[in-house]
Amino acid sequence: MAKEGVEKAEETEQMIEKEAGKEPAEGGGGDGSHRLGDAQEMRAVVLAGFGGLNKLRLSRKTMPEPQDGELKIRVKACGLNFIDLMVRQGNIDNPPKTPLVPGFECSGIVEALGDSVKGYEIGDRVMAFVNYNAWAEVVCTPVEFVYKIPDDMSFSEAAAFPMNFVTAYVMLFEVANLREGMSVLVHSAGGGVGQAVAQLCSTVPNVTVFGTASTFKHEAIKDSVTHLFDRNADYVQEVKRISAEGVDIVLDCLCGDNTGKGLSLLKPLGTYILYGSSNTVTGETKSFFSFAKSWWQVEKVNPIKLYEENKVIAGFSLLNLLFKQGRAGLIRGVVEKLIGLYNQKKIKPVVDSLWALEEVKEAMQRIHDRGNIGKLILDVEKTPTPLMANDSTETSEAGEEEEDHEGDSENKERMPFIQ
């Protein structure tokens, strides 16, 4: 770790030990790590169990070492995505066992190479996908999920790059075949994926982008979206008022009744893509009522109706494509194209804010509140803001057990989704 990072890590050491109820570790190394017996330790965000924000804590874990085909990366920055919020709640299919270290993407410097690794050297600046464990000072991940980053790309930009831009690119160009003169509707236009979609659409001539977002974000993102609507407005009528035929592509991260609305807006040969289900998340913890309500609102898809109307319905999950379906080669080609666009200054990650590992609860709350414009980043070397050291971010046990209520407009306003 760089000297500056060492100093910052040392500044927070006493606080971490105090929270963990330990005496300060002895024999701390010059790289910001610590030793327990013969094993080196690192800082990591740990999810102790599924639930609210109080299930997250900063802890020390044994530092991993690369296995055959893996790279060891000294992490500089980590991406925080809505899927991480769903993981925290246990609101995903087949959730892993806890305790675990969350996070699926990071950037940093190659520190060690496992056997059979080629094409990388110690000291390379890289970004990577990680199948969990990204929110830590050190990660190990297979070489097929690691990519070198341009010299002028910062670590925070690199951590904001993989999930957002790969998701947007595959949906637009691999699934929906975006071409000149088409139109696209994207929800959560102010989020990481939404901004990536808007930027990639601008690389194709005469593409019209319709977007929905919270009103307070409109001023900041109005130049990236052709037509912008409040997310609580009747966007179906607004879109049809501008384009009576509808749109060519709908990118839906909301699900629920938005599925039927999206399908109704498609032109003949149009493509609807579901890539998230934020309407299943309302309160602090997983709500079976919200989940059931959201899926009950999903319009039943009749294949005969799709055939008659010449419409296409699809789904996309980047993590499943990478870690379950073995398409790392396809994704590497996409990343290379995206880096080319970055080098041509046609795209650039939008970073909302940087947070220390100690501030992960506050960062996750910002996503939940739809407060971000672009991507939130956990900066491993950042010193926490003094105000964050108090107990204001701890969730009470009463709040931990809260359920969403249908008539609660405040909770509805907090329905999150960014990626």
Image (cartoon, helix red, strand yellow):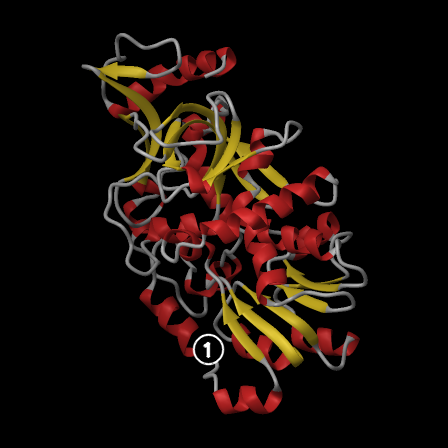
Left of 229 or right of it: where is 161?
Answer: left
Foreground of the two, 164 or 216: 164
Q: Quadrant of the N terminus?
A: top left
The answer to whether one can see residue 78 in this image is: no
66 or 403: nearer the eye? 66
Vertical order, 275 against 262 (above or below): above
In the image, residue 44 sits, relative to residue 169, either above or below, namely: above
Count of marks, rendered view: 1
Residue at the spot x=48%, y=50% of the render?
329
Residue 389 appears in the picture as rendered = yes
Residue at left offset 45%, top offset 50%: 328
The residue to which callout 1 is attached is: 298
Q: Report which quarter residue 248 is drawn in.
A: bottom right
Name above or below for residue 235 compared with residue 346: below
Camera-nearest residue between 74 and 44 = 74
Q: Position of residue 210 (x, y in %)?
A: 71, 65
Q: Residue at x 47, y 83 (%)?
A: 301
User: On the rendered structure, is 236 left or right of 32?
Assistant: right
Q: Position of residue 290 (x, y in %)?
A: 39, 67
Which quadrant holds residue 93? bottom left
Q: Position of residue 148 (x, y in %)?
A: 55, 33
User: Which residue corresponds to the image point at 74% horizontal and 69% vertical from the top-left?
Assistant: 182
Secondary structure beneath label 1: loop
Amino acid type assigned to the residue bearing label 1 in the image: Val
